[in-house]
Image (cartoon, coloured by chain):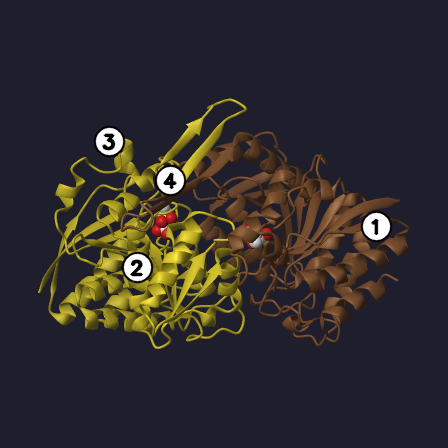
Chain colours: A yellow, B brown
Amino acid sequence: RFYDIAVIEGDGIGKEVIPEGIRVLEAAARRHGFTLRQKWHDFAHCDYYARHGRMMPENWKEEIGKPAAIFFGAVGWPDIVPDHISLWGSLLQFRREYDQYVNLRPVRLMDGVPCPLSGRRPGDIDFWVVRENTEGEYSAIGGRMFEGTEREMVMQETVMTRKGVDRILKFAFDLAQTRPRKLVTSATKSNGIAITMPYWDERVEAMASSYPEVSWNKFHIDILTANFVLKPQIFDVVVGSNLFGDILSDLGPACAGTIGIAPSGNINPEGEHPSLFEPVHGSAPDIAGRNLANPIGQIWSAAMMLDHLGEKQAAADIMGAIEMVLKQPSLRTRDLGGAADTQTCGKAIADLLA
Amino acid sequence: RFYDIAVIEGDGIGKEVIPEGIRVLEAAARRHGFTLRQKWHDFAHCDYYARHGRMMPENWKEEIGKPAAIFFGAVGWPDIVPDHISLWGSLLQFRREYDQYVNLRPVRLMDGVPCPLSGRRPGDIDFWVVRENTEGEYSAIGGRMFEGTEREMVMQETVMTRKGVDRILKFAFDLAQTRPRKLVTSATKSNGIAITMPYWDERVEAMASSYPEVSWNKFHIDILTANFVLKPQIFDVVVGSNLFGDILSDLGPACAGTIGIAPSGNINPEGEHPSLFEPVHGSAPDIAGRNLANPIGQIWSAAMMLDHLGEKQAAADIMGAIEMVLKQPSLRTRDLGGAADTQTCGKAIADLLA
Ligand SMILES: CC(C)[C@H](C(=O)O)[C@@H](O)C(=O)O
Ligand SMILES: CC(C)[C@H](C(=O)O)[C@@H](O)C(=O)O
């Protein structure tokens, strides 16, 4: 079996964790008898911007072609390019132009990871955040008026469509149906955000009525974030808009110990376009280039990618290897109280697959 | 000394915690020789809506008059009135029409309150959230198109003005200047919300340049919520937009143990309009009417109100009494592992002021 994979390192620690992800993918491929045909792309990073005045070549879609998936590191180097320019010119463009409307992120407390919440043990925290990934609060519609004067103001639209809201809710309810608890929690803020959020609530109610076996509830985003800390055990599948999903999928992994190991899939479920797999963390300029980064976010993303490609056993094996390595202080990275550097940790996971 | 106070209980546990707040205020007034002239208002609750089809009488401003402050419980009873209608017709209207542009909320880990974060002790968590309270994401501009069809969509504007952004930032930097650490943290999301948030960042930078003695940093809201859990000790004054401030001021108190004791001031710093003091928690339909609610959020709000009115010593005395009561299991309410009901707890605090 062959899979074409586009590989994009991006900026900062992206360049350190992608090689570890690839190392592990290759070990899994050898073990399970498939081949990943990699095409590495030297764009979607801020050095490219510095040279070309844009993040990607105009014909980036042609360049990328039709891979089975995109394996992505992290983008952003704010000293060279403001974040909104680097991200809108790369990652956010992929999400939209490849219609990767699901951003799927697990939140799981793993053995060996120090948990900031007192008394929580592996098993207590285990849920999915399903984030809408193409519309909502991340719009480019709006602008500035009375620029440079006392009357200056900016406006920006949040846009939600029935198509956009319904399809992410459907994904969440479908996912809940595969889980033992079958519970969907919707993130809203309909008491304050009085146009888009009541609409979101309406669609949740409509969708829920077609899933009689799935139970559901909703929380306003303020108290929902509080409950991530106070009662993480009550969640199963949490679905939110682009912004709310973004917040919850950083907060969730933090409650489970660290953003450093959290993966994500930017998924086009219909398979009309490639899906993209990347760690939740960013390019981390503060630790970049020092072999300090935790590669597990990238490696777990590799497992999600293989799962998406249908290589379920290979994905499960990588998860098993991650779990083994997390339990060993000598193989965990320093952010988790371990002693390993980026490469030692990545190599340990790859070796377990040999 | 006399102060005219408007009292509004609202819905649900508002009706149980307001009387405790008043009990404590009266004890503080007796002790310190001032008088609170109370005018209780029987509107801004959902029963009023059920009778009149609106949350408040048309002439509510006249009815309220020109009190020194408004002492407010909680609004909302979603079984009768959808939250966005009840809130926009009461609390959010006060905030806007009285130009209470600062929402000020302390986050403090108190002795006796069980903390969900492991290893944190009183003193480790002690910061303020300064929330913009009149504009931003809470706008009523927008609407729905193609209603009832597959093409249905909703749009809603976020509106930020230079006046609105600058004045809340100024309040935050002024506040930081009175604190030992003198640090402002700005909540942004300029990598994703690409129009309003880069503007917010720009104004933060401009404001910071007039406060050379105050240091500042910024975090995107996703990683900021994560850091509330992972590193709450790094914060001093955290400033955010209406929505981000809303989220952070629920998440913060949760990290410090409970929303139940968290107070807030909706402040018009110029004193052109009355300021409003209310607990952070809502009307809590699930426990309403059972003498179970924790009255400390309301009582701490009373202390903030007295502080605002210039009765600093009375405010400090209430805080001292709250601290005493929190340390005693027999006087704490059940949500904090204590044995007291709403009234027992409120009375204990009032008695300490006698
Ligand atoms: C009730 C709701 C509209 C309100 C808000 O979002 O402002 C509340 O959550 C708060 O924080 O005061
Ligand atoms: C980098 C940023 C634009 C991005 C987002 O907000 O979507 C990131 O935080 C994420 O969660 O993938």
Give the amino acid at mark 2.
Answer: Gln
| Amino acid on which disc 4 is placed | Asp
Label 3: chain letter: A
Mark 4 CB lies closer than 8 A to ligand 2: yes
Q: Nearer the viewer, mark 1 or mark 3?
A: 1
Residue ID for mark 3 = A52
Label 1's element?
strand
Answer with the quarter of the image where residue B66 lies: top right
In the image, what residue occupies the spot 65% across and 46% down?
A: B57
Name the front one of labels 1 and 2.
Answer: 1
Host chain of mark 4: A
N-terminal label among 4 and 3:
3
Mark 1 and mark 2: span between their CA atoms? 68 Å
Quick check: B199 left or right of A211? right
Chain for mark 2?
Answer: A
Is residue B200 visible to us here? Answer: no
Which marked residue is nearer to the observer: mark 4 or mark 2? Answer: 4
Q: Which mark is residue A343?
A: 2
Q: Are marks 3 and 2 in contact (CB under 8 Å)?
A: no
